[in-house]
């Protein structure tokens, strides 16, 4: 981080978030990880991560580069295994069922647990509309209300009003922030329970970042969101809980997790306080 900030200032930001409206809804039991380890070949990258992600919440993962945050979220939707030589141990439970259990359909898991990457990646040869619905085609999911689903997905991603009159334009014609929201709409179209976001705003201007953050808060009313971020202000603005990761010459570990306002006002571990106040990282 470039500047030193006081924990109280970040805590004030966290406390200033509008309260969520409590409504009756069946969101499932959420997501849990139990004793997750990850390796790249012989390199032990991540050690013994146990976290609960309640349905209808946003959890921010913070910590210095190289501490395993991105590796961790890639284990959550089984993307880690794409890498040659990668391995993991532990359990990832979605609604109480281990997504790594024998016989689990990996494709279905990735529909339930969507991913938005650091760099927007719309399919360049597809139109805006085709991009949003591409996941349905790849997963061979048949729907009878494509137009309604297209509008709903773009609306929930905060993009409908900006693109409704040019759905036939290529996705690459959008600005960077719009492309990122297009990727969010693409993830939403297949109806996930969880969305993972790996530094989704790191390449965006402040205005686009604000719109993404507004989208995250709105989406969290109906799903579970996990966001990796190096921006402490962003973590304070959007998350309900924050987990601090750190690697100290060994595999990445989770140092502590707590409601976001507590992490930024009264962290239990001195290393957490040092990080959020800009003393290192």
Image (cartoon, rainbow, N blue to C red):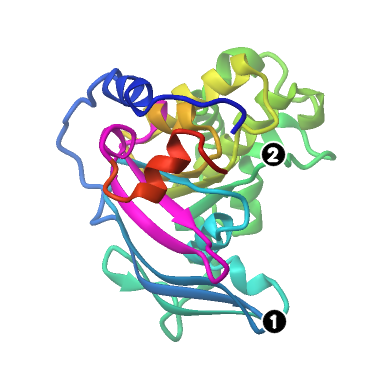
Spatial CA span between label 1 and label 2: 31 Å
Q: Circles 1 and 2: CB distance less than 8 Å?
A: no
In the rendered image, which quarter contains the N terminus? Answer: top right
**Dot label at residue 27:** none
Q: Name which residue lies at 53% across and 63% down.
A: 248
| Residue at x 26%, y 23% (from the top left corner) | 15
The image shows residue 35, relative to residue 52, as above or below, that is: below
Q: Is residue 76 visible?
A: yes
Residue 248, relative to residue 62: is it above or below? below
Residue placed under numbered mark 2 in the picture: 131
- How crowded pointer 2 is (Cα within 10 Å; few <14, some 14-19, many 20+) is rated as many
Position of 20 with respect to 68 (left or right) is: left
Q: How many marks?
A: 2
Displayed quadrant of residue 223: top left
Establish if 13 lies above or below 84. Answer: above
Is 260 on the left-hand or right-hand side of 76?
A: left
Of residues 51 and 78, the one drawn nearer to the viewer in this rendering: 51
The residue tagged 1 is: 85
> In the displayed structure, does residue 223 sit left or right of residue 248?
left
């Amino acid at each position: 981080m470039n500047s030193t900030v006081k924990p109280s200032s970040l805590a004030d930001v966290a406390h200033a978030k509008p309260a969520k409206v409590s409504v009756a809804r069946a969101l499932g039991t959420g997501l849990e990880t139990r004793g997750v380890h990850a390796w790249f070949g012989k390199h032990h990258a991540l050690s013994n991560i146990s976290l609960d992600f309640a349905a209808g919440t946003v959890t921010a993962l913070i910590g210095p580069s190289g501490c395993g945050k991105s590796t961790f979220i890639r284990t959550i939707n089984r993307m880690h295994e794409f890498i040659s030589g990668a391995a993991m141990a532990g359990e990832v439970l979605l609604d109480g069922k281990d997504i790594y259990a024998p016989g689990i359909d990996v494709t279905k898991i990735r529909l339930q647990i969507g991913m938005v990457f650091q760099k927007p990646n719309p399919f360049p040869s597809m139109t805006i509309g085709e991009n949003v619905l591409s996941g349905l085609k790849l997963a061979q999911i048949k729907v009878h209300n494509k137009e309604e689903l297209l509008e709903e997905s773009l609306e929930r991603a905060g993009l409908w009003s900006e693109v409704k009159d040019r759905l036939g334009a290529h996705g690459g014609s959008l600005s960077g922030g719009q492309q990122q929201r297009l990727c969010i709409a693409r993830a939403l179209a297949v109806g996930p329970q969880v969305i993972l976001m790996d530094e989704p705003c790191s390449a965006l201007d402040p205005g686009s970042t604000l719109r993404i953050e507004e989208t995250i808060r709105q989406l969290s009313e109906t799903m579970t969101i996990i966001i990796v971020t190096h921006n402490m202000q962003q973590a304070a603005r959007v998350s309900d809980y924050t987990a601090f990761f750190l690697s100290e010459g060994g595999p990445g570990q989770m140092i502590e997790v707590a409601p976001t306002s507590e992490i930024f006002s009264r962290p239990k571990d001195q290393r957490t306080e040092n990080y959020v106040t800009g003393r290192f990282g």
